[in-house]
Each structure stands twice: as C-alpha cells, then as structure tokens.
Image (tube, rainbow, N blue to C red):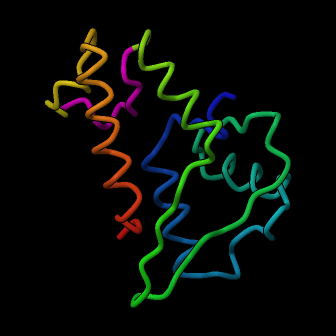
Amino acid sequence: MPKPMTVQNHGNLGRLIQKWVLDPTSRPKEGDLVELKRQLNDADVSAMIDPAVTTFRFATHKSDELVLRLPPKDMWEEHRKRLETEDYNLPPFYREVSAPGAQPHASVDDKLAFDEERLGDYTIANCA
C-alpha cells in the first residue's frame, strides 16, 4: 500500500495544522475527505491522498497524556521490505540529516537502524 498521503510543501502543511490546533472550528469534519482536500489545496500543501483512503480522523491528546501512535502492521511490513531495495525516502527538509541510513545508497542495515530510530522518535514526539 502506498503512503496514505504525500506532501510537497511541508511548511504549508505545518501552518495549516497549526491553524487547526489553535482554532478547532477551522478543522474539516472528521471523515469529510472532500473538505480536507479543499483545505489542503487552499493552503497550497500540494498533497496527494491515496485513492484507497476512505476516511480520516484527528488524533489529539491532553498535555499530561502520552500517546503512542502505532502504524498499521501491513504498512509497516511493506515499508520495511521496501528499504531492502530502495533508498530511505525523506522529505526534502531533511536534506541535512547525516545519519548513515538517511543517505542515498545506504546499506540495508543502516536504513533499517535509522528507520527504527525515526519510528521511536515519531511515536513519542507528540508533534510538540
């Protein structure tokens, strides 16, 4: 399965998410993909949502709550398999990352180790 959403302008996406955080009434209604796509387009995010995606929801939490976001098993297995033959695909704003697994033509072991570190960080970061 491809990534559920790809983005060309991560800065604009971050600004849109910030708007949703600060003004919850500005968020599209959960599940309303048409409105979500409209807002992404209006914000010039240049996002593509995979046609297999049929719904969406917001996941938020309280400041005293730790949320551990886990990827779906099938997506994780496919992603790890892809690292055996492809370079690690990072958004352009990561260009300065010097971790061995992030570099073009990295070894499979380095890519898998970097991937585990990113998963760990992403899972606990809570975006703030």
Query: Principal SS element in the magenta part?
Result: loop
Is 114 on the left-hand or right-hand side of 6?
A: left
Q: Quadrant of the N terminus?
A: top right
Tally of numbered discs: 0
Residue 53 image-quadrant placement? top right
Residue 24 image-quadrant placement? bottom right
Q: Above or below — where is 50 with respect to 60? A: above
Determine the residue positioned at 53% across, 64% down: 17
Residue 30 lies, in percent from the top left, at 79, 68
Q: Is residue 120 magenta?
A: no
Determine the residue positioned at 17% across, 25% down: 100
The magenta segment: 87-96
Determine the residue positioned at 37% across, 15% down: 87
Q: Above or below — where is 44 with respect to 98? A: below
Q: In terms of depth relative to the viewer, which is nearer, 84 or 102?
A: 84
Is 34 on the left-hand or right-hand side of 123?
A: right
Residue 54 lies, in percent from the top left, at 85, 47
Residue 71 lies, in percent from the top left, at 56, 49
Is 95 on the left-hand or right-hand side of 8?
A: left
Q: In terms of depth relative to the viewer, which is nearer, 49 or 83?
A: 83
Q: Above or below — where is 104 with respect to 46? A: above
Residue 35 lies, in percent from the top left, at 81, 58
Determine the residue positioned at 71% across, 56% down: 39
Q: Is residue 88 magenta?
A: yes
Is 21 on the left-hand or right-hand side of 57?
A: left
Q: Above or below — where is 100 with respect to 108? A: below
Q: Quadrant of the C terminus?
A: bottom left
